[in-house]
Amino acid sequence: MAVISSRSSVLLIFLSAICILIAPAVAGPTLLRYSCSDRQGGKYSSGYKANLNHLFSSLSSNSTEIDYGFYNSSYGEKPHEVYAIALCRGDLKPDECRNCLNISKDYLTLERCPNEKEAMVWYDECMLRYSSRSIFSSMEETPEFFIVSIYNISAGDAKFEFNKDLWNLLQNLRDGAATGGSLRKFATGKVAAGPNFQTMNALVQCTPDLSEQDCSYCLRRAFENFWRSYAGAIGGRVLRPSCNFRFENFDFYHRTADAPSPLPPPASAPSPSLAPQGEKSHKPRIAIILRVAAVLALVVLPVVSICIYL
C-alpha cells in the first residue's frame, strides 16, 4: 500500500505541474471593471430584455464584425430599443474575441447588472456595453477607471526623461489609432524610456465608430488625467467607454500587432516554401507528423480534461 500511495503522490504532483503550465491556455478573460447605470430610469421590461437577447444572439453569430474585433448594432423600437457596442483588443484572434464577449454578456445580465437598462464591462481582452439610448459615434469620457502599478520612478531627472519618452510614444500611438478606419482604431508600440533605457510597451484603442478628432481627443484627455496623478508609474491603464490605453514594462499583447512585415526573399532565390521538393522527402515527414499528432492527442486531451475537472 505504501508503494501505491507513493506512486499516486508522484502522479498527482506530475499532473499538478502540467495543469499549472497549461492553465493560461484554458483560463478565461481577465476581468477589470464594470459599471451599472440607472440613469435611464429604473429596471428594464420584458420587451427590453427580449430585444437585448436578440442583439446578443446576433453578436455571437456575426462573424464578419467579430473578425475585426468590433460590433455595434441596435434592435427594437422605443421604448424598448437597445443599442450595443462590443470592442475586442486589436491583437486578438476572432475565437478569443468571441469567447470574451460571450462571457461579458453573461457577466452583466446574470451576475452584476441584472435588469439594468445601461451597463458596461471591461476585460483585459474586450469591452461590452449596452444602453436604451443611442451610443453610436458618440465620444464618452465617463465612467473612467484607473489601474496603476505600485512601482514608480521617483528620482527627478530620471523621472523627467522617463515621462518624456513614454509621453512621446503614447502621442505617436494616439495619432496612429485615430487615423484608423471604421473597423479598427488600434495601435501598439514600444520605446526605450529614461536614462536606463527601460523597455516600455504601450497600447491605445478607440471604438472605430468615433471620428478621427473624437478618438484623438478621448485618448489625449485620458493621458492627461492619468499623468496628473500618476506620472512616473512604470505601468498603468485608463478605461473609458470610448477609448482606452495601457503601458507596462513587460509584454502584454501579441507582438505581431506592431511587428514589421517580413522582407520578401531576393528575386534571384526561390522562397524556401516554394522550392522544388522530391516526393520521397514528403512521405516520411508526413508520417512522422501524423504519429506525433496522434501521441499528443492521446496524452494531452486526457490531461486537459483532468485539469478542468480539478
Image (cartoon, helix red, strand yellow):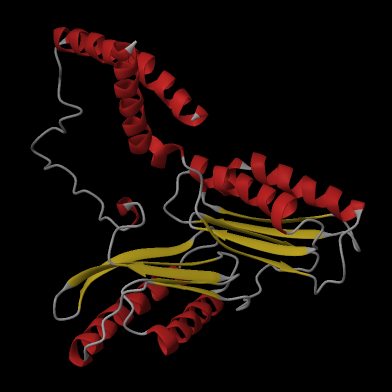
182 vs 25: above or below: below
Position of residue 40 in the picture relative to residue 135 (left or right)? right
Q: Residue furthest front?
A: 2
Residue positioned 14% across, 81% down in the render: 195
Residue positioned 55% across, 62% down in the render: 182
**281 vs 307, nearest the viewer:** 307
Residue positioned 75% across, 49% down in the render: 55
The percent coordinates of residue 251 (x first, y second) are 30, 58
Q: Quadrant of residue 4?
A: top left
Position of residue 173 in the picture relative to residue 214 (left or right)? left
Quadrant where the image shows the N terminus: top left
Residue positioned 47% across, 24% down in the render: 305
Position of residue 259 in the picture relative to residue 126 (left or right)? left
Q: Quadrant of residue 20?
A: top left
**50 vs 258, nearest the viewer:** 50
32 vs 162: above or below: above
The percent coordinates of residue 153 (x first, y second) are 26, 81
Position of residue 276 in the picture relative to residue 291 (left or right)? left
The percent coordinates of residue 226 (x first, y second) are 44, 82
The percent coordinates of residue 198 (x first, y second) are 19, 71
Q: Residue furthest bottom?
A: 156
**235 vs 56, nearest the viewer:** 235
**How many circles with numbers are drawn on the protein?**
0
59 vs 136: above or below: above
Whether residue 290 appears in this view of the structure is no
Whether residue 117 appears in this view of the structure is yes
